[in-house]
Every structure is written in C-alpha cells, then in structure tokens.
Amino acid sequence: MKFIINKNDIKSILAKVQGITGRRTNLAITETVLIEALESSIKITATDLETGFEGEYPASVESQGIIAINAKKLYEIVRDFPTGDINIDEVENRWIQIGNHNIEYHIVGMNPEDYPDTPKFDNISFFEMDSASLKRMIEKTVIIVGASEDKRAHINGVYLDYLENKDNKLIKMISTDGSRLSLVDYIYDAKKAPFESGVLIPKKGLHEVSKFLDTQGRVYVGLKESQLVIKKDTEILTVRLLEGDFPRYAEIVARNQGYDIVVDRQLFLLMLKRMAILYSDDYKSVVFNFTENKLQVTATNPDIGESKEDMNIEYLGEPVEIAFNPKYFIETLNVIDDEFVNINLINGEKPCLLEGDKDKSYLSVIMPMRL
C-alpha cells in the first residue's frame, strides 16, 4: 500500500478521533486507526467498541491496501509535518514509512485483520437535522456528568425523545445526574415521525460525535439495531445505545407555579463565579437569600473563610432561603445565549428552573441542597 495525502485533509480528523482511540479497552488495536487506500481516496476508521467513525478523504493512491497504525503517533507526525504532502508507504512486516525526501519515520503497524468489525447498515431510515442545532443540543446535555462509579444507564446517557403537541413536533434531548436535569428542544418540521420510541445514548459517545458536527449545513440521523447513526457527506459516526429506562421528566420540568425572576445572565454568572472561589469537595453549597427586590448569595467554608454578595432583582414574593451547588448554575449559564435568564423559584425545598428569557428551547432544573 502506498499513497500521498495532504496534511490539511486529515490533520483535523486525526485530532478529533483522539477521544475515541484514546479510550482504554480490552483490545490494544482500538488505539489505532484503520486506513484503507482505495482508488483515489483513503478511508479512515476509528472505534472504541462503543463509538465508531468512518470517513473518506482524497489521496493520490499508487497502490491499494490497508494498515492499522497508532492514532496518537500518526496525529503527532501529521500535525508537526513541515510540508503539505505526506508519503505513506507500507514496506514490509507491517512497518509503515511516513515522510518525504527530507524527513522519514518508520512506524510499526498492527495486523488490520484484528481490527474490530464496524457496524454496517442497509436500508436505514434517516431523518434530517440542522447540524449546528444538533451540536448545541449535545453540548447543553453532556455538561451533566454523573459520578464515574455510577453505572446507571439514565445517569450515563442522554435520553433522545420525540413529542408531538398541538403547537409543534419536538425532538428532545434530556440528561440528568440525579441532582439536576437539562432539556433541549428542536422543532422538527417533517411529516413522518423521526423514530418510534425514546432511546438512551452514552454521553461520552455524544461528546465525541459533537466534535465532528459543523456549525452549518445538515446531517442525517438514524436509529437501527441498537445504534445511533450520524451521517455527513463523507463521514459516518455510530454510537451503541444503552439499555435502561429514563425517569419520567414531564412533571419535573412543568412550570405551573412559583415566582419568575429575570436577571442579567452575565452579572449573575460573574457573581456565582466569585462565590464559587470558596467551593471545595467538602463544602459545595452557597446559600441564596431572596428578599424584596434583592438576592444575597453567601458562601461559607470553614477551611478557607466566607463571602457574600448582593444583587438587585425584581422580586416581590415571600422571603426564600435556599442552598445550591454554584457549579451547576455556572455550567448552565455558560450554555445559555440570551442576555437575560429567567429563574423560576417556588420555595426552599423545590427545584429551581432556569431558561433564557427569550429562547425557551433549553431548560435546566437544579435541585436544592440541605442547609
């Protein structure tokens, strides 16, 4: 096998697959990328046995063949290569020569026959989505990461759901860690329902998928044989679905009572960042005191000290004292685009709901902590 590839055609792809090939599995070969030289292109494959990637890119192919080469080392070579065109040649005994007339690497490959089979899908039914919207949906749900030792499917996954009401058809993504919940809506305008029932998608797999999604254009999404499939022009990503149930979320996100408070997103965010300076693993909460037209936030950490800050707000409800993890608010506010955010507050025991003042497609629910 021998071909010439331009570094700009594969550098960004090799960078993106590092999250897949860098994951530890029981098979050392998953640390490699499989490269197949075709007539006038190469196909790059990566997998961690749960998330898979295939992409095809232009190349000048002298002889066809297939190799498996360490993904990290190949990326580092390509990233720092001094010229645009790179010669890749399998010489003998799976040794791979990479370089040009000035620079040359000899890297040992692995047996491509040992590479795991990647899912193949025929007659799959795809539905179409805006790529940027799907990317934002993923980013706003995978910010919630459960404890590493928690093996529950609904904690490790994002729930993909579909709902029709009298106003809209909505594709939904929902995630939770038990202490908070994020929900993102996407208005679906096709006549046929995109899928029959909700599924759980691993957060890690979705995080890797988001790296390949562009901020413009369209993508095709399909569900088949326990796999999520994302298709672009010359690239396909697959994620193996989780088995398990997701909690009923409709009642949690319902907004039928409480008091709505509108605050400046940036001012609120900076305030919480200042209060979070005293945050530690042992002292994770800050206390919110809502009184007439004022919010006071207090942080206390016996190991470090204490702090407090006041903010003027429009609030005429009953005084409420409630404790929250400030990190949850900070992560939520970082993915809201509106200038102002709406806080729905009921009392000191009920969860708090946050959303943009104008954009209602994203909702965050944050549970209070014990005072």
Image (spheres, helix red, strand yellow):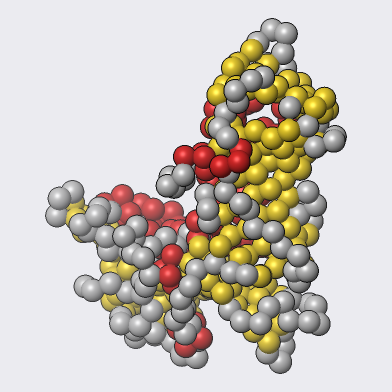
x, y (%) of residue 169?
A: 71, 82
Quadrant where the C terminus sits is bottom left
Residue at the far top in the pictured view: 102
84 or 262: nearer the viewer: 84
Residue that appears at 30% across and 82% down: 349
Asked if one can make out residue 344 in the rendered structure from this viewpoint, the answer is no
Q: Is residue 95 above or below residue 28?
A: above
Image-based side of 168 in relation to 152, left or right: right
Count of marks placed on residues: 0
Image-based side of 298 in relation to 25, left or right: left
x, y (%) of residue 326?
A: 36, 61
Asked if one can make out residue 347 in the rendered structure from this viewpoint, the answer is yes
Residue that appears at 65% across and 33% down: 67
Residue at the far left in the pictured view: 302
Residue that appears at 71% across and 92% down: 166
Q: Is residue 97 above or below residue 293?
A: above
183 or 5: nearer the viewer: 5
Image-based side of 106 in relation to 202, left or right: right
x, y (%) of residue 300?
A: 21, 59
Image-based side of 206 in relation to 177, left or right: right
Task: Place residue 238 in its image quadrant.
Answer: bottom right
307 or 286: nearer the viewer: 286
Q: Is residue 71 above or below residue 214?
A: above
Residue that appears at 68% across and 87% down: 164
Quadrant where the N terminus sits is top right
x, y (%) of residue 204?
A: 50, 56
